[in-house]
Image (cartoon, rainbow, N blue to C red):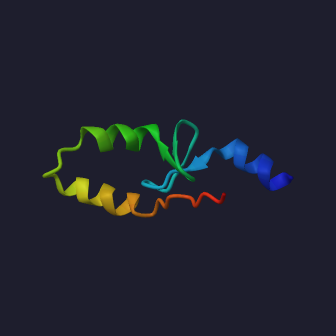
């Protein structure tokens, strides 16, 4: 129970910047902070930073649905 309380106090770890943040969105089982989301959507596809984002987003796996 104490680890759950600690996690809530420090936020969640962003899959892109790997820092603990309070605000962001969940994509499947991963968390993306608002700062990284803003950078991601405003980065041009020709920018080298865009490739960095793509590589980080590859960590996100679609959860399996069991029926």
Residue 30: horizontal and vertical position, in percent?
53, 52
Q: Residue furthest right?
A: 1
The residue located at (32%, 55%) in the rendering is 53
The residue located at (44%, 37%) in the rendering is 34
Q: Residue furthest front?
A: 67
Residue 55: horizontal and vertical position, in percent?
33, 63
Q: Is residue 61 left or right of residue 35?
A: right
The residue located at (71%, 43%) in the rendering is 8
Q: Residue furthest left?
A: 46
Residue 60: horizontal and vertical position, in percent?
47, 59
Q: Is residue 59 above or below residue 45?
A: below
Q: Is residue 21 left or right of residue 45?
A: right
The image quadrant of residue 17 is bottom left
The image quadrant of residue 54 is bottom left
The residue located at (50%, 51%) in the rendering is 14
The quarter in which the C terminus is drawn is: bottom right
Q: Is residue 43 left or right of residue 17?
A: left
């Amino acid at each position: 129970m104490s680890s759950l309380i600690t996690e809530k106090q420090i936020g969640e770890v962003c899959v892109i910047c790997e820092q603990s943040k309070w605000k962001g969105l969940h994509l499947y089982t991963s968390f993306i902070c608002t700062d990284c989301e803003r950078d991601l959507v405003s980065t041009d596809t020709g920018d080298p930073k865009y490739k960095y984002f793509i590589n980080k987003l590859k960590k996100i796996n679609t959860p399996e649905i069991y029926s």
